[in-house]
Amino acid sequence: MELFCVTQPGLEAILAQELEALGCAGVAPTVGGVTVAGDLAEAARVNMASRVAIRVLARVAEFRAMHLAQLDKRARKVDWPSILPEGARVKVEATCRKSRIYHDRAAAERVAKAVADAVPPGDGPEVALKVRIEDDLCVISLDTTGEALHVRGHKFFVGKAPLREGMAAAFLMQMGFDPAAPVPVVDPMCGSGTIPIEAAEMAAGLWPGRSRGFTWEALGVARPALPDPRPVPPLFHGVDRDQGAVQGAAKNAERAGVPVAFSRGAISDLVPPEGPKGIVLTNPPYGARIGDRKLLFGLYGALGGVLKERFAGWRVGIVTSDPGLAKATGLSLEPFGPVAHGGLKVTLWQAMP
Ligand SMILES: C[S@@+](CC[C@H](N)C(=O)[O-])C[C@H]1O[C@@H](n2cnc3c(N)ncnc32)[C@H](O)[C@@H]1O
């Protein structure tokens, strides 16, 4: 079977590296995701262990279809009862590109009817099938994930304009954070604590999906055994000027079972923690979402000044959608990205002050 691990455009190469490190076979990045070889058990493992994937689709059928009657006939040849649980309530989504079948909804309806005739819907689990018709080739995939993977089951407090967990992890990986030899990670504008919590979980070797549910559980796949967590050194720090954010972030870390030190403070008061140098990775407010752009120039300037003066030798990463604000830090920055993020395109700007 072939599995397609979806991620945000821009993160494909990082996801491919992560999947290689997880021991996946046949890792091949492509636009919007990474293909790997494997069965449903492998899909379950990737769902549980990957931080950068958003969902895992298992390819269940592939055939040529030149017109709707042919789509219908060939969809009926698929052994749906061996693929879907009894009584499954199946949702079919279709996209057609460069094909004689061009009507997404009509294609979805044909496949849905063929599936429902083979597996009558009842009180079974909800399952999503994705139909993609490109150059008259129809590929049908089963979504093994359910709710998108960036939703970690143990994170309840969400602050203003949170960074997606998968992006925080991907940017840490891009900055060379090595879970086997962790260095300190500081986020001076940590909001709900996404960045230091992801870093601490990575260092602990905890699987991000350990406390949530997935569609694959309804498909008769056994839950993979979780790896034993490693002890985590006290290297992870989150600071925010908002007391509510600091409290919520501390609760998130507690539920995740990882040690992250959170404190309240403004960027102007930031000092490096004692001990070795490491990574400052932060996602300051950006105008398109919160705050007024003009005021933000001052904030980015202050951030750049503090990092230059007090964090010599630290690796610095600033995540923003606004190149003008990144420039206002006064740091010499290299862009990585952009990566699509909730209707915006954000870039990781990296510096070594
Ligand atoms: C975009 S949010 C960060 C979101 C975070 N990455 C998350 O995933 O939840 C920006 C944060 O910067 C904080 N902030 C704004 N100005 C600050 C300042 N001068 N000093 C410290 N924190 C500040 C805000 O309180 C907010 O929590």
Image: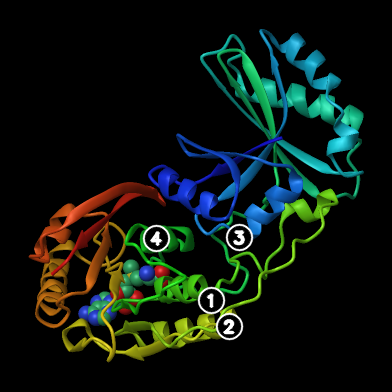
Q: Are marks 2 and 1 in contact (CB under 8 Å)?
A: yes
Q: Residues within 10 Å of mark 3 (few under 14, many from 20)?
A: many
The x, y position of residue 188, in whole percent, is 28, 79
Dot label at residue 49: 3
Dot label at residue 204: 1
Badge 2 marks a residue whose secondary structure is loop
Name the residue at 16% across, 60% down: 325
Give the quarter of the figure containing the N terminus. top right
Badge 4 marks a residue whose secondary structure is helix
Q: Name the residue under label 2.
A: 257
Disc 4 from disc 3: Cα separation: 15 Å
Name the residue at 59% across, 9% down: 100
The x, y position of residue 262, in whole percent, is 39, 88
Badge 1 marks a residue whose secondary structure is helix
Left or right position of 60 against 229: right
Closer to viewer: mark 2 or mark 1: 1
